[in-house]
Amino acid sequence: CSTGTRKGLLENCYSLEVATSHLNVTYHNTIEADECDDSPVKICPCEEQWLADRYKSQPWFNDAPTAECMPCEDGVSTTVAYIDPATTTMEAPTPAPTPAPTAE
């Protein structure tokens, strides 16, 4: 292509009127969030109501009493830690397998 031809093609691109209405996005109003029913988890294991609902009210309870309920420890976290490989340094693996333990 000659310089004149390229210039003409470029000017043609600048003068194009391209239809873009098919790319328009309509954003609708958001819906209200549903209320969360947390009643199934409000009563914790070993609380009197929990014991009554799940054990003491059962027809078999008097014939097969349960052991004392052991509540979960306070402050026990079930959060999983995320290790960012970009900021965490790891030791290189050893070049040979770890030797088997020996009897002393």
Image (spheres, helix red, strand yellow):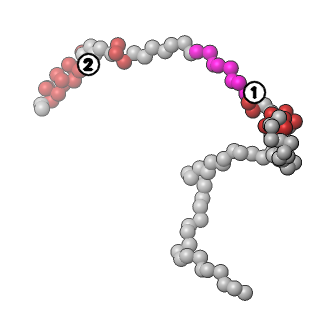
Residue 1 as seen in the image, left or right of residue 60: left
Q: State the SS at label 1.
A: helix
Kind of residue at badge 2? Tyr
Position of 86 relative to 11 (above/below): below
The answer to whether any part of residue 29 appears in the image is yes
Q: Main secondary structure of the magenta part?
A: loop
Residue 52 placed where, x, y %?
84, 35
Instruction: Provide the residue designation for mark 2.
Output: 14
- Residue nearest the observer in this picture, 70 or 10: 70
Kind of residue at badge 1? Ser
- Residue 39 is marked as 1
Question: Could you give the CA–CA distance between mark 1 and mark 2, rounded to whole angstroms?
Answer: 63 Å
Position of 92 relative to 61 (above/below): below
Residue 40 as seen in the image, left or right of residue 10: right
Q: Is residue 30 magenta?
A: no
Q: Name the residue located 80 percent from the left edge and 37 percent from the top edge.
A: 58
- Residue nearest the observer in this picture, 24 or 67: 67
Q: Quadrant of residue 30?
A: top right
The magenta segment is 31-39
Q: Name the residue located 59 percent from the left edge and 61 percent from the top edge.
A: 90
| CB-based contact (under 8 Å), mark 1 and mark 2 | no
Residue 48 placed where, x, y %?
87, 36
Q: Name the residue located 75 percent from the left edge and 27 percent from the top edge.
A: 39
Number of numbered discs on residues: 2
Q: Residue furthest bottom?
A: 104
| Mark 2 crowd level (few <14, some 14–19, many ≥20, 10 Å Cα) | few
